[in-house]
Amino acid sequence: GENVEQHPSTLSVQEGDSAVIKCTYSDSASNYFPWYKQELGKGPQLIIDIRSNVGEKKDQRIAVTLNKTAKHFSLHITETQPEDSAVYFCAAYYGQNFVFGPGTRLSVLP
Amino acid sequence: GAVVSQHPSRVICKSGTSVKIECRSLDFQATTMFWYRQFPKQSLMLMATSNEGSKATYEQGVEKDKFLINHASLTLSTLTVTSAHPEDSSFYICSARDQGGGEKLFFGSGTQLSVL
């Protein structure tokens, strides 16, 4: 089955700096990769996603890149703000299910 | 984006009682809904996949008689924790796939269950 790894587990950045979170997946059959942001006590919120036929996608301060050959994808947040502090999960769509990474706790320091 | 409504957001119950959690897709139809359990500072653990009009598919190790799932319509799935015990205390989250939106998965706001 699919396995998704995510690094780092925790990340602290200064406000205004960029943050990068990386994920790898094991099964080349996975073809859809969403990213979720989860704030304390709330459900995950879809923030950006990418399909396997695309190498990069951007939405304002957030971008995702995908390297199918290496089977890894990354989330890039630029000009970070305190409200970006949360736990971020990557996922791979495999078969009919989603496999989630273990999460990255991002702290943006003012 | 699509909205998934989950209620209640928080419930406290006595050991031995049953608790029902509702998950509704408000502006789309969901043939498939998923139920997850999340422990503090951990990732999402899939409990079961709920398909409209059919029996749910449970993940290995999840007791189907304890966690009853019903998906009676394209917009509503319920999870009932029967005879709850303190070890069932957890954060439960539902999610739904937009039938007309491909693979996109949207989550409810979660339910914090505390069993005394």
Image: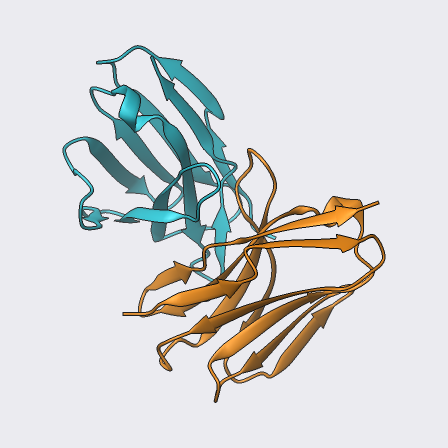
Position in image of residue B83 (x %, y %): 20, 19
Relative to residue B37, is residue B60 depicted above or below? below
Q: As rendered, which of B95 and A107 lies closer to the eye?
A: A107
Position in image of residue B97 (x %, y %): 43, 55
Which quarter of the figure has residue A67?
A: bottom right
Determine the residue positioned at 18% across, 30% down: B66
Give the number of marks: 0
Which shade is chain B?
A: cyan
Position in image of residue A38 (x %, y %): 58, 45
Relative to residue B80, is residue A66 depicted above or below? below
Determine the residue positioned at 34% across, 53% down: B32
Q: Is residue A51 visible?
A: no
Determine the residue positioned at 29% across, 41% down: B71
| Image quadrant in which the C terminus of chain B is located | top left
Q: As rendered, which of B56 and B83 lies closer to the eye?
A: B83
Q: As rendered, which of A100 and B17 lies closer to the eye?
A: A100
Q: Is residue A68 visible?
A: yes
Q: As rendered, which of A21 and B80 lies closer to the eye?
A: A21
Residue lying farthest to the bottom in this orientation: A69
Determine the residue positioned at 22% across, 33% down: B68
Position in image of residue B90 (x %, y %): 38, 30
Horizontal relation, residue A15 to residue B6: left or right:
right
Which shade is chain A?
A: orange
Picture colour scheme: by chain
Relative to residue B113, is residue B61 depicted above or below? below
Horizontal relation, residue A63 to residue A43: left or right:
right
